[in-house]
Image (cartoon, rainbow, N blue to C red):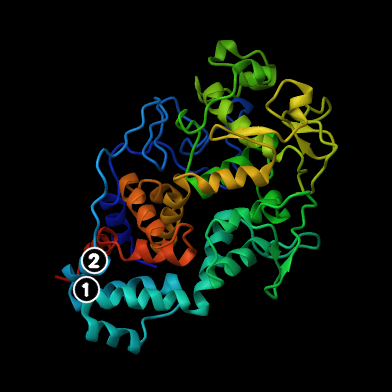
Amino acid sequence: MIGRACTAALMSALALVGCYSGAPLAEGDEGAASTGETSEGGEAGSAAGSTDASGSSSSGDATTEATTEPEVVDPLAELDQFSEAEARAYLATIAPMVVGRLLTEAEAKLISYYGSRGLAGVIEGWIEDKAFAETARMMMQVKLHASGQSDEIDFELPGNLAAHVAAQKLPYARLITADYCVDGAGSKIPCDSGAPYTAGVLTTRAYLRANASRFNLRRARRMLYIFNCQVYPMSSNLQPPLEKESLIAMFQALTPEDQTVEEAKSGFGNGFACYSCHSQFGAHSQLFVRFDQDGNYRPDATGLQDPEDELGRSPGGLFVSHFVDPVAAAQEITQVFGVPVEDLAVAAKVLSEDETFYQCGARNVIEWTFGLSEAEAAKTDPLLLQELARRARARRPEPTFGDLFLVTLTHPAVIDVVLAGQGALP
């Protein structure tokens, strides 16, 4: 893992001032402003607004788009600006987090022979290494808060799928679109939630149990944050809000004075943000309305409040829907990024096809490789992420784990920042 000096350099050099106003919530924080649970760093929403990975501001509907075609670059020629010593030092810095070991003598010799252009060849070799699949496993276990075993639940299923996707060079999107899970031996098996559909890691009891919370807020928030790098409220161009009248009373409130639900009045911690956040939150949390607190699929879910339990809990260990209509509350039908979806599997496909998906994948690579916190990684320049996603999709229409690591870790802006943090190099 790189030193703190290098981390600080990454944060300052890869960030645009004012490009991000939110931060991920701490584990266990449900982030519901109007349920009395305010966010640490504001991921649940702030009236000040935030910027999504595509560079759109959530405080307005305008989206800035490039007016010219991106310049075609030669990735190898870009590396000529670095010396052999710099290339060797850079690889030595990142090797432990990518393949879990130090730079080998053979890899150092490759740099001596090809110069800094050999840097790309070394990283391509790492992607072929068996250890790379384990890197993908660990990376997603950390992001998904899921690993280990219990008497009931195999918390290794998400990591197993990530390792399989990386080892088999399958599209990165299979993490949430695969119609199977993978056991410890690497064999395909049905996922364990009992749902009549499969959405990769999202339909494992490991993910569902580890991220269970009232109103299904944590399940929705982690899904959008991990795979599309979105926080609430996000751009209304990206996620159109639900109609105010379609929500239960507590989520219709725009001001503390509007709040009519007694249990929510004392916890209205984010000012005007309740409807702003939950008009989008509600669309995504509805995807999980039929999964109980242990991750089991329950077709009998009603999505209605249990009058004998705390706010946000539905009978039978289930969670409350945002929708006021009892028929709508019991259904999985909703909309994601403005697209009507019938269940979580369809929604996952929509998420994976949005431009923010691979931008977010590149940000996850930066976060993991350089030991950044989620809050630190969230400050990465959105324009850099757009460029990394473009390069990954230029390699193949559905980039793999390896593609994302390669284009990210060979980008001159990333290399420059790491070298700047080394201090001892010219």
Compare marks 1 and 2 and give the one earlier in the sequence: 1
Horizontal and vertical percent for residue 27?
58, 48
The one nearer the camera, 174 or 233, is 174
Q: Which mark is residue 419?
A: 2
Q: Amino acid at mark 1?
A: Glu
Horizontal and vertical percent for residue 142?
55, 59
Q: Which mark is residue 54?
A: none
* Mark 1 crowd level (few <14, some 14–19, many ≥20, 10 Å Cα): many
Left-right relation of 296 to 419: right
Viewport quadrant of the C terminus: bottom left
State the SS at label 2. Answer: helix
Left-right relation of 384 to 230: left
Q: Which residue is mark 1?
A: 86
Horizontal and vertical percent for residue 283?
62, 31
* Mark 2 crowd level (few <14, some 14–19, many ≥20, 10 Å Cα): many
The residue drawn where x is 28% and y is 39% is 66
Q: Amino acid at mark 2?
A: Leu
Q: CA distance from mark 1 to mark 2?
A: 7 Å
Horizontal and vertical percent for residue 406?
38, 66
Question: Looking at the image, is 396 positioned above or below residue 321?
Answer: below
Cβ atoms under marks 1 and 2 closer than 8 Å: yes
Viewport quadrant of the N terminus: bottom left
